[in-house]
């Protein structure tokens, strides 16, 4: 509440005046016995005498309530800046609007592997310092993207720059670009403290795709920043790749990743079942 809003009724103003033996100036101020303006609420000075170039001058100062008011405004501005930054990070970092929905608040606690997502976020500072990522593998619809998305949103909530994308999107962006432009796309991804790539292994295995996937993974690997990869591939396939092109991609991922198998209930199947049951109810 600002001092102006805390105007005292006339009777109380008189009491304040007699207590401080001053003269009322305007509204919430009075002139104290030392001739300086004072606050009617906290009785702090709003002016002080200073010597400037050999002459005494009176300069304005903030009383306690004004300091409080200023600090409160600064806090509010900081909070607003933080919220704006957070939403900008989410908009720039989550390349699919569907990822916005993947958050711990929506965890139905039925996938025991989700504990790793909580642990990763809790230990983020260490994970970041050590460049430790996750390799989340398992069948389709077992909650891999949800797990990764929860980590993305929880870190973005703390204003950590995270990018969550997939190789199909990366390849789309890269196709038709050359040299510096292509390098810039990859280096922009690496500005993020965490890079999450959903669905490694579903893209076409063309030479171009393989080369670009290698470039993305290798450049991330050399940046020593963590990445999280979700894949439908079996861990045995990743550990025993079919050829040297796959080997050089997978070995870089495995070197700095904690491997988590998502083998829970197939969420998509379950959701489909639920939708079906609801549809049946409607048609009854
Ligand atoms: Zn005051």
Image: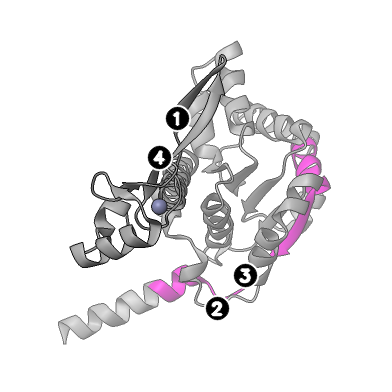
Over which residues does the magenta segment extend?
246-271
Foreground label between 4 and 2 = 4
Q: Name the residue under label 2.
A: 109
- Tag 4 or tag 1, which sits nearer the N-term? 4
Q: Name the residue under label 3.
A: 114
Vertical order, 149 against 195 (above or below): below
Cα distance, mark 1 to mark 4? Answer: 13 Å
Q: Mark 4 points at which residue?
A: 35
Cα distance, mark 4 to mark 2? Answer: 68 Å
- Tag 3 or tag 2, which sits nearer the N-term? 2
Mark 4 packing: few (<14 Cα in 10 Å), some, or many (20+)? few
Residue at 62% from the left image edge and 70% from the top image edge: 114
Mark 3 lies on a secondary structure that is helix
Name the side, left or right, on which 219 lies relative to 278. Answer: right
Q: Name the residue under label 1.
A: 59
Looking at the image, do the residues carrying marks 1 and 2 touch, with CB atoms under 8 Å apart? no
């Amino acid at each position: 509440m600002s001092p102006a809003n805390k105007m005292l009724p006339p009777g109380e103003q008189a009491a304040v005046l007699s207590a401080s033996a001053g003269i009322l100036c305007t509204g919430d101020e009075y002139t104290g016995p030392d001739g300086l303006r004072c606050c009617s609420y906290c009785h702090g000075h709003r002016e002080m005498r200073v010597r400037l170039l050999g002459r005494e001058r009176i300069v304005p100062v903030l009383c306690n309530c004004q300091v409080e008011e200023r600090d409160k405004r600064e806090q509010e501005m900081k909070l607003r800046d933080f919220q704006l930054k957070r939403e900008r990070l989410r908009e720039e970092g989550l390349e699919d609007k569907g990822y916005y929905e993947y958050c711990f608040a929506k965890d139905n606690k039925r996938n025991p592997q989700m504990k790793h997502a909580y642990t990763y976020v809790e230990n983020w500072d260490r994970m970041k310092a050590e460049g430790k990522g996750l390799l989340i593998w398992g069948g389709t619809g077992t909650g891999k993207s949800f797990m990764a998305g929860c980590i993305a949103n929880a870190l973005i909530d703390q204003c950590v720059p995270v990018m969550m994308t997939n190789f199909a999107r990366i390849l789309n962006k890269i196709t038709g670009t050359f040299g510096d432009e292509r390098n810039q796309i990859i280096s922009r991804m690496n500005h993020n403290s965490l890079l999450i790539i959903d669905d490694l292994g579903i893209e076409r295995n063309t030479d171009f795709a393989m080369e670009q996937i290698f470039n993305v993974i290798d450049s991330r690997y050399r940046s020593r920043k963590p990445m999280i990869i979700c894949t439908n591939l079996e861990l045995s396939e990743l550990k025993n790749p079919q050829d040297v092109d796959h080997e050089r991609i997978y070995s870089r991922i495995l070197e700095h990743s904690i491997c988590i198998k998502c083998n829970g209930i197939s969420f998509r199947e379950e959701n489909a079942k639920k939708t079906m049951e609801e549809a049946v109810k409607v048609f009854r």
